[in-house]
Amino acid sequence: MSSNIITETYPLVLTASVLNLIYYIFTALSVGSARVKYGVKAPAVTGNLEFERVYRIQMNGLEYLTVFISGLWLTALASGNDFVCGIIGLVYLVGRILYGLGYPNNRSAGFGLSFLPMVALLIWSAYLGATGVLRKYIF
């Protein structure tokens, strides 16, 4: 087996990324299943409250997924910290799952466990970027 810098240096971040993408695919497939179950034909996204619940869980996940994955990898690459970034990625996943299980009435805990890690990653990567710019171009 050949060596690979990503799998050797960032195995936990890679695992957290893949698990989050698998969960997103699961939510997308759930929407397709709900369309059939509740008779909501594409491209409609309304018409049955249970379908709309499943659809909103998937769409909310999609709305955050690009920011999360980008923030996860930017922070991991800039910090070199696979462990902390990977754990943050797994906490985010737990948050997304709890969000989906609690939607719509009990989604607060899941939202917090996914939104706060995302913000933490963005703040950490912004800090690393700013200090890098200062070191390289200012000081």
Image (cartoon, grey):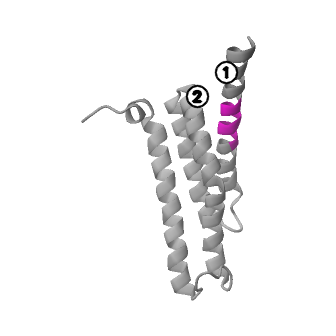
> Please, which residue is most extreme toward the top here?
139
Q: Earlier in the sequence, mark 1 or mark 2?
A: 2
Callout 2, which amino acid?
Answer: Ala
Q: Quadrant of residue 107?
A: bottom right
Q: Which residues are magenta?
A: 119-126
Q: Which mark is residue 132?
A: 1
Q: Which mark is residue 84?
A: none
What residue is shown at x 54% (from left), y 31% (from top)?
A: 77
Quadrant in which the N terminus is drawn: top left
Q: Position of residue 39 (x, y in %)?
A: 57, 89
> Please, which residue is most extreme toward the left here?
1
> Please, which residue is most extreme toward the front here?
137
Q: Nearer the viewer, residue 90 or 42?
A: 42
Q: Position of residue 30 (x, y in %)?
A: 52, 72
CB under 8 Å between callouts 1 and 2?
Answer: yes
What residue is shown at x 53% (from left), y 45% (from top)?
A: 90
Above or below 83: residue 108: below
> Please, which residue is most extreme toward the right here?
138
Residue 26 shown left or right of residue 119 in the figure: left
Secondary element at tag 2: helix
Secondary element at tag 1: helix
Query: Label 1, label 2: how many angstroms apart (C-alpha)?
Result: 9 Å
Quadrant in which the C terminus is drawn: top right
Task: From the image, give the main secondary structure of the stretch colored magenta.
Answer: helix
Residue 99 part of the magenta-drawn span? no
Q: Which residue is mark 2?
A: 78
Q: Position of residue 56 (x, y in %)?
A: 66, 69
